[in-house]
Amino acid sequence: MRTGKAEVGHIQKMRGTERVVSRMPILSDDKIVGAVGRVMFRGPEQLAALSKRVSALEDEVEFHKRQVDALRRRGYGLDSLIGESQPMQRLKREIAKIAPLEIPVLIFGESGTGKELVAQSLQALSLRRDNQMVMVNSAALPANLVEAELFGYEPGAFTGADKRGRIGKFEQAHEGTIFLDEIGDMPLEVQVKLLRVLQDKLVERVGATKPRQVDFRLISATNRDLQSLVSEGKFRLDLFYRITPLVIQVPPLRNRVEDIELLVAHFLQELSLQHRKPAPDLDEAALAYLQEQPWPGNIRQLRQEIERAFVFAEDGRITPDTLMSYGDFSPSTVLPAATASVGAEGRSMRDVVAQTETDLVRNAMEHHRGNKKRVAEELGISRSYLYKLLDQQ
């Protein structure tokens, strides 16, 4: 009543027993006319018990969140790796053999081939599938903050630090998996600190006095030639051996063109659901066109091309014209590059090659009475390329 301020959670003795109470002033016309007191808890012990219960409930919620995350990640099993070509069948067999093991794995592949999906598949089929997979972009780790990011820090460890401290990536991956993407781009000074953790599986938070034991499965990925980087002094040899007991090579799209039809169907279905719009059909000539491209950007590039085709398709069909009009392919990626020199008959090399192909296909089609399978076998070309040539005639 003297101060006019509320007092909440105070300890007050009542007949020799401590109670946790709240005391509130009563105002009338901005004047204090009294106060009311209320027992909140019968004693500090009851408050401590409530605090313990809240803490237990928070732990339970966190556990269920991890369960939901694990169930969501199970969708990234082998079924998420689309393709039935020989290279993809080999890849799936390797993943199925390696996933149950605790041995570190390096996933090697060009940019855009789906290395992250392979990592998700390894996790989904592993013994740690019910626990978290923590993903780290190794190239984006700043050297001055790497320890705080990877190992965490104690409250007040440095200026600007969170007052509650922060758990690092390796502790987050405890009993789960840590995925170090783009490890070939990791700075040398970061490699030194990483090697120590991989050797001892001990992390020490910034500002802490004792290290913590962590249990994790290591998966790394890169599109760089690590052996060349070792020779150039840009990657530590001891770290190279630590992360490469097992290596999985992800095939580039140009080595599995048979899978393009399945991939396109998958992307079109996704886009149809996302935009609530019917998916256009892909005609055979357009498929043949796609299968003859070099795909330097791999699956990521294919998806981008299909997104454009989805938008600009006319009359519900994706044709070669759709792809050529709105795609990123340069003329040199459509047909083999030819010089602009003109021959004796006034035709370029490209014209001569095209005419020769046309004549060979026409003669073979007549000889085999239109049997495209036999024509393709005789000419030593894929049936998709044969369809493309026939469409151009």
Image: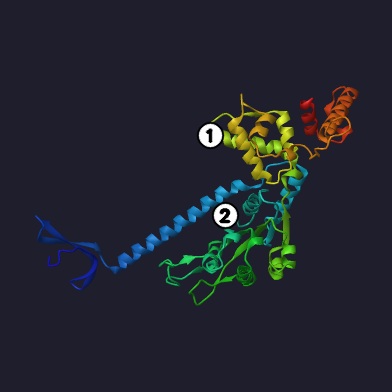
Q: Earlier in the sequence, mark 1 or mark 2?
A: 2
Mark 2, other Cα within 10 Å: few <14 / some 14–19 / many ≥20: many
Q: State the residue at coordinates (52%, 76%).
A: 210
Mark 1, other Cα within 10 Å: few <14 / some 14–19 / many ≥20: few
22 is higher (above) or lower (below) than 250: below
Dividing the picture into quadrants, the one containing residue 320 is: top right
- Badge 1 marks a residue whose secondary structure is helix
The residue where tag 1 is placed is 275
Residue 24 lies, in percent from the top left, at 17, 61
137 is higher (above) or lower (below) than 387: below
Asked if residue 110 lies left or right of residue 269, the reply is right
In front of the other: 22 or 18: 22
Kind of residue sitting beneath label 2: Asp
Residue 353 lies, in percent from the top left, at 84, 33
**Could you say which disc has been placed on residue 130 in the image?**
2
166 is higher (above) or lower (below) than 254: below
Dividing the picture into quadrants, the one containing residue 49 is: bottom left
- Badge 2 marks a residue whose secondary structure is loop
In front of the other: 323 or 115: 323
Residue 148 lies, in percent from the top left, at 51, 67
**Viewer can see residue 177:** no
Kind of residue sitting beneath label 1: His
Of the two numbered discs 1 and 2 in the rendering, the one whose residue sits closer to the viewer: 1
Q: Quadrant of the N terminus?
A: bottom left
Asked if residue 86 lies left or right of residue 282, the reply is right
